[in-house]
Image: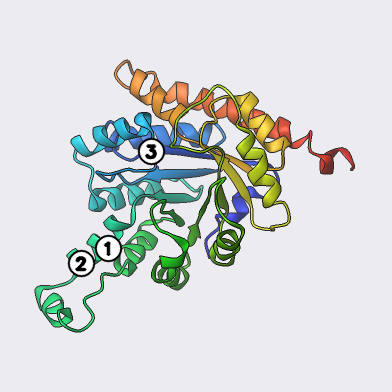
Amino acid sequence: MSDLASAFDGEPALVSYIAAGDPSAEQTKEYVHALVEGGSDVIELGLPFSEPIAEGPTIQRAVKRALDAGMTPERYLDLVRELREEGVEVPLVCMTYYNLLLQHGQASRSDDDRASAAGCDARASPEAFVADAADAGIDGFVIPDLPVDEADDLKAACDEHGLDLVFIVAPTTTDDRLERMLSKASGFVYVQGRMGTTGARDDVSEDAHGSLDRLRKSTIPKAVGFGISAGEHAREIVAGGADGIIVGSAFVDLIAEHAADGTAAERLREKARELKDGAVAGAKETPESQST
């Protein structure tokens, strides 16, 4: 497996999302460096898809900007390689939708292979994309539209190439389904902190605390996302038992507002520091830290 789980060792982890190619591949590289300098422990690099059903308006607009700028799965993998060549060492997680992985596998087959597969085993496979992603430097996947009961092919491919597969636990996830997710998950569990789609909010939902209570006995790291936008939110979430926080829309908003004036990178660095400091402060308020 990758080093993804180790990003949660010691201090609570900051997992930072941006959409690859928003507003350009070159600027994405600048922003990833800024987020790492600000304290991000994991970068969740979104691979844009035309139907991002789990995303709210903020990230939907980022995805559209990236697609309009020409981002493709092939350019995405090149971008990951370039980030590794430039010295980015933190785990990189690909957040995208399952159809893109399957299409990549079909596209990588030769005409003869596709003709041979027709009539026997024409089932599309994610294996080709997982192999290419591992070669480029990706450490794991978050696939929000892939149900755990249909994840065996992707799980097998990830295991073969040493990558982690992260599942999203929603407030409505049943106990049986949660058990199946935990049996297949690695790296960390993505705890959906509230119902609905992604997007920055002004408060922390009680849903986040309820989900953390359900996962309290699990040993896999737990990172809460959906709605976190300020250091105070990060402090409250970590004090409530999370091993990390996931932040996307707050960063994407800064890119949307300040890419044109050239200050987005510095603002991303400052926001990451605020969120990381909040998470570290929250870790000092947990019952475990106060009993030692």
Q: Pointers 1 and 2 in contact (CB under 8 A)?
A: yes
Q: Quadrant of residue 116?
A: bottom left
Question: Height in image: 219 above or below 154?
Answer: above
- Residue 86 seen: no
Position of residue 21 measured from the top left corner of the image (x, y, whole percent)? 29, 38
Position of residue 291 measured from the top left corner of the image (x, y, whole percent)? 90, 42
What residue is rendered at 40% in x and 51% in y? 94
Spatial CA distance of label 2 from label 3 is 26 Å
Q: Quadrant of residue 182?
A: bottom right
Position of residue 27 measured from the top left corner of the image (x, y, whole percent)? 32, 32
Q: Residues within 10 Å of mark 2 (few under 14, many from 20)?
A: many
SS at circle 3: loop
Spatial CA distance of label 1 from label 2 is 6 Å
Question: Height in image: 202 above or below 5?
Answer: above
Position of residue 155 measured from the top left corner of the image (x, y, whole percent)? 45, 68
Residue beneath disc 1: 102
SS at circle 2: helix
Q: Residue furthest right?
A: 291
Residue beneath disc 2: 106
Which residue is at the front of the view, 280 or 263?
280
Q: Which mark is residue 55?
A: 3
Question: Height in image: 218 above or below 34?
Answer: below
Residue mark closest to the camera, 2 vs 3? 3
Spatial CA distance of label 3 from label 1 is 21 Å
User: Mark 3 or 1 closer to N-term?
Assistant: 3
Q: Mark 2 belongs to which amino acid?
A: Gln
Q: Residues within 10 Å of mark 1 (few under 14, many from 20)?
A: some
Q: Mark 3 belongs to which amino acid?
A: Glu
- Residue 4 seen: yes
Task: Say whether residue 292 is left or right of residue 37.
Answer: right
SS at circle 1: helix
